[in-house]
């Protein structure tokens, strides 16, 4: 089967099993008996959780969701080979490997992960008309700058960003996001950012870490990152290893349109998916690949406090 047909078949299987018919393997409980790597106080709001130790029986190119939504994701192009032995924290097992494959070829072979449906992913409805979101996980970068842009003929052209993990908007083409952790060019300098969009088709806001990204994410070192998105207040925050990061907003106006009467929530549309390690999880285009390893990616439907982020980090770092 060709790569395109394999990707289409896998996506269709995800949609049919987990989105339309609810026939996927039951998700792990997000209550008191939920995943042990998740602090008990967070489990009720854990919409999706991927530790890359739980392939879908019968198809190791799919990863089970251990959160409450049961949203399986595809390991795009690399399949089961994308699960590698690497301990992000005590008690962890395998991690996800993402990477650019052919930097000089305008193809679709980069290793990335996620799910996409043009009609919206129903199992991700918790992010429909939501007041807040948190994205967090463990990341180990294996690159010092964005990769060559395979979509242009200029061999010196590079992407302006490195994709980590995020939730797509309800009208996304596979790139546009509602809540995203990434590294992106800000005024000519690559920075770690939280990038959010409250309204489908609306403007995004970016909160950028002030510290040099190479200090925050040293090559070859596991780091725990978190980003929170308060769509009601119009604010975001970044955390590294459980501690808040100083930063700044790239816009000083009101891109989320929260100045007027509230309450303010995201558009009442189901996200079109999740993207991990690059854009276009439907594998129709390459964009912002990440030569990285990732583990225990968590997507929650509320804003965690600084204390909760630190508690979750210590829960993992201390081996529960």
Image (spheres, helix red, strand yellow):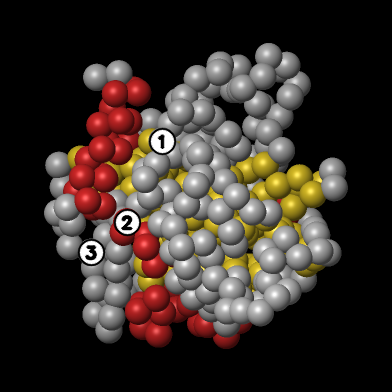
The residue pinned by badge 3 equals 27
Q: Residue at x 30, y 18 (%)?
A: 2
Across and down, in percent, residue 51 comes to 36, 58
Asked whether the viewer can see residue 140, the reply is no
Residue 52, labelled with which disc? none
Asked whether the viewer can see residue 268, the reply is yes
Up-down: is 319 above or below 279? Answer: below
Question: Dot 1: what SS?
Answer: loop
Disc 2 and disc 1 in contact, CB within 8 angstroms: no
- Of the image marks 2 and 1, the number of the one nearer the N terminus: 2
Left or right: residue 70 compared with residue 126? left
Q: Which residue is drawn at 44% across and 58% down?
A: 269
- Of the image marks 2 and 3, the number of the one nearer the N terminus: 3
Of residue 262 and residue 48, the one placed in the foreground of this image is 262
Residue 282, labelled with which disc? 1
Discs 2/3, front = 2
Disc 2 and disc 3 in contact, CB within 8 angstroms: no
Discs 3/1, front = 1
Across and down, in percent, residue 316 comes to 44, 73
The residue pinned by badge 2 equals 122
Q: Which residue is drawn at 54% across and 71% down?
A: 265
Across and down, in percent, residue 30 comes to 29, 75
């Amino acid at each position: 089967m060709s790569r395109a047909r394999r990707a289409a078949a896998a996506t269709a299987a995800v949609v049919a099993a987990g989105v339309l018919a609810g026939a996927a393997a039951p998700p792990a409980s997000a209550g008191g008996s939920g995943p042990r790597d998740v602090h008990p106080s967070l489990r009720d709001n854990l919409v999706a959780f991927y530790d890359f130790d739980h392939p879908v029986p019968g198809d190791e190119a799919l990863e089970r969701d251990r959160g409450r939504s049961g949203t399986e994701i595809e390991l795009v192009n690399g399949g089961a080979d994308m699960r590698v032995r690497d301990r992000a924290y005590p008690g962890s097992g395998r991690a996800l490997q993402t990477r650019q494959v052919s930097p000089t070829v305008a193809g679709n072979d980069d290793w990335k992960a996620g799910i996409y449906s043009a009609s919206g992913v129903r199992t991700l409805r918790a992010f429909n008309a939501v007041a807040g979101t948190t994205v967090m996980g463990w990341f180990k970068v294996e690159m010092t700058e964005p990769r060559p842009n395979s979509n242009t003929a200029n061999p010196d052209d590079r992407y302006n960003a490195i994709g980590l993990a995020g939730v797509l908007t309800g009208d996304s083409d596979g790139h546009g996001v509602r809540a995203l952790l990434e590294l992106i060019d800000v005024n000519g300098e690559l920075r770690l950012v939280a990038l959010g969009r409250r309204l489908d088709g609306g403007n995004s806001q970016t909160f950028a870490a002030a510290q040099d990204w190479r200090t925050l994410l040293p090559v070859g070192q596991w780091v725990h990152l978190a980003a929170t998105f308060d769509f009601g207040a119009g604010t975001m925050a970044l955390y590294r290893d459980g501690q808040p990061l100083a930063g700044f907003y790239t816009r000083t106006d009101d891109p989320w349109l929260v100045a007027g009467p509230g309450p303010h929530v995201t558009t009442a549309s189901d996200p079109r998916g999740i993207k991990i390690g690059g854009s276009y999880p439907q594998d129709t285009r390459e964009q912002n690949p990440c030569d990285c390893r990732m583990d225990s990616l968590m997507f929650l439907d509320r804003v965690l406090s600084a204390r909760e982020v630190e508690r979750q980090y210590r829960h993992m770092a201390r081996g529960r």
